[in-house]
């Protein structure tokens, strides 16, 4: 299959455009959010999610009342004065090494926090806790596990959420062999989450890590298995499941047409209606070098998924890891490169692509205002409307690796 790749054929021009975007008015539309009680090694911003005017940030290595790495999450809301902290979420009971906030998901007034190292059903079996907001107050509601999880499963390493369904990845569950992985679907009923089904790969094998990433939109779920070997060793794959109002069924298995060894296609996924954005952040591209990274766009028509385009960095280099984070909303794709060197080695950068009549095209790039080496700006991404949240857990404002989150307002023509 011939694939179309977006890359710089006139590198100087694209680099100039990127410089103008980074250096111009765009950073005036950028805000930084820090934990009011942040400390060294908290990793505030290891994960982040945004929904409208609400921001949810995980700090999975925060110590709570002297309990090491219990973890926490912070809720912020936008008002006339900017982003203000509304709540700090801590699970009850909490234990050493829970790592609450290693992953977070947000939908309206529901926050879901992963605790992949919680020893709920054995060491590092994992769990997930839900909080809900009523009258601007957040209350803990449920601690979720699966009946068949056991030591080392990492249940809650990944989470995806919409109004009706909650998807939880357990990439080290031994469904089809050691660390083959699984994902669990919970359904919303009477204001609670109830277990619905368990998803496994049709071709799952030992070490695939099915569940390393999950995404949901409507009645469609993506589950990444970034160490799948069908195309090549650790080339990766993504499985698509759809709900027919009775049960979830596998619709497709997606793989990069040019997938190669250790590309880890599927390590991050994003979904918007009939479009999927899939990371292969260790892809070796001929122009850019080893581990430069890439991301693929797949589209669905009448139940058939087709690879539409491969996106790469217009100014990338070897080891940039373009595709560390991906976010997608209709015709806008956001892709981060955590090891980009714009503000010094491994400071990180984020790229914007838009889809129009001519197809997907690179639009602009932005970096952190005041970014520093080793920040890894773009560790994770979130997108709501024209607002991008960029998780940066290695930022040092409140001490080494205390962490930060940047909010970037996009200058787009989107309505």
Image: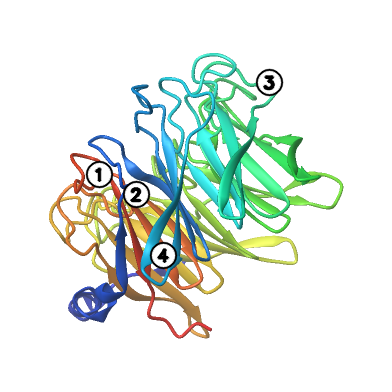
Q: Which mark is residue 137?
A: none
Q: Residues within 10 Å of mark 4 (few under 14, many from 20)?
A: many
For mark 2, what is the residue? 379
Which mark is drawn over residue 148? Answer: 3
Determine whether the residue tagged by mark 1 lies in a helix, strand or loop. loop
Q: Nearer the viewer, mark 4 or mark 2?
A: 4
Could you tell me if the residues under marks 4 and 1 are in contact, i.e. CB atoms within 8 Å? no
Q: What is the C-alpha distance between the residues marked 4 and 3?
A: 37 Å
Give the mark toward the camera: 1 or 3.
1
Quarter-wise, where is residue 335 in the image? bottom left
The span from disc 2 to disc 1 (Cα, nearest Å) is 9 Å
Disc 1/disc 3 C-alpha distance (Å): 35 Å
Query: Does residue 399 appear left or right of residue 350 in this picture?
Result: left
- For the residues labelled 3 and 2, the Cα–Cα distance comes to 31 Å
The residue that disc 1 covers is 394
Mark found first going from the N terminus, 3 or 2: 3
**Residue 407 in the image, given as x and y percentages of width and height:** 36, 63
The answer to which quarter of the image holds residue 37 is top left
Q: Earlier in the sequence, mark 4 or mark 3?
A: 3
Q: Is residue 52 visible?
A: yes
Element at badge 3? loop
Asked if residue 4 shows in the view, the reply is: no
Measure the C-alpha gap from mark 4 to mark 1. 18 Å
Element type at mark 4: strand
Q: Looking at the picture, tell me which residue is in the foreground, 248 or 377.
A: 377
- Mark seen at residue 388: 4
Give the residue at x 45% y 25%.
98
């Amino acid at each position: 299959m011939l694939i179309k790749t977006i890359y710089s054929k006139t590198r100087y021009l694209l680099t100039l455009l990127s410089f103008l975007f980074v250096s111009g008015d765009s950073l005036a539309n950028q805000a930084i959010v820090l934990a009011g009680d942040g400390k060294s090694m908290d990793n505030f911003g290891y994960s982040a999610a945004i929904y409208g005017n609400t921001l949810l940030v995980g700090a999975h290595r925060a110590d709570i009342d002297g309990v090491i790495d219990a973890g926490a999450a912070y809720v912020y809301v936008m008002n006339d004065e900017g982003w203000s902290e509304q709540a700090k979420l801590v699970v009850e009971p909490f234990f050493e090494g829970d790592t609450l906030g290693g992953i977070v998901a947000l939908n309206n007034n529901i926050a879901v926090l992963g605790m992949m190292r919680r020893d709920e059903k054995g060491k590092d079996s994992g769990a997930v806790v839900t909080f809900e907001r009523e009258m601007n107050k957040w209350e803990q509601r449920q601690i979720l596990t699966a009946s068949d999880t056991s030591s080392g499963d990492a249940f809650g390493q990944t989470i995806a959420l919409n109004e009706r369904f909650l998807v939880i990845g357990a990439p080290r569950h031994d469904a089809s062999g050691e660390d083959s992985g699984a994902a669990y679907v919970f359904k919303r009923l009477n204001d609670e989450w109830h277990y619905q089904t368990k998803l496994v790969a049709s071709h799952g094998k030992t070490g695939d890590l099915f569940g390393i990433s999950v995404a949901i939109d409507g009645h469609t779920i993506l589950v990444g298995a970034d160490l799948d070997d069908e195309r090549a060793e650790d080339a990766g794959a993504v499985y698509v499941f759809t709900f027919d109002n009775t049960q979830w069924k596998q619709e497709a298995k997606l793989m990069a047409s040019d997938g190669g060894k250790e590309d880890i296609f599927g390590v991050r996924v994003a979904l918007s209606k009939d479009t999927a954005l899939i990371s292969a952040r260790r892809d070796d591209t001929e122009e850019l070098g080893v581990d430069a990274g890439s991301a693929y766009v797949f589209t669905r028509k009448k139940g058939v998924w087709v690879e539409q385009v491969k996106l790469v960095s217009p100014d990338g280099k070897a080891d940039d890891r373009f595709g560390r984070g991906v976010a997608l909303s209709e015709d806008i794709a956001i892709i981060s490169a955590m090891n980009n060197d714009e503000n010094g080695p491994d400071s990180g950068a984020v790229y914007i692509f838009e889809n129009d009549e001519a197809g997907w095209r690179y639009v602009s790039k932005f970096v952190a205002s005041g970014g520093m080496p080793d920040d890894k700006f773009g560790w994770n991404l979130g997108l709501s409307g024209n607002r991008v949240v960029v998780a940066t857990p290695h930022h040092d404002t409140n001490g080494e690796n205390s962490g930060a989150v940047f909010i970037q307002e996009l200058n787009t023509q989107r309505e």
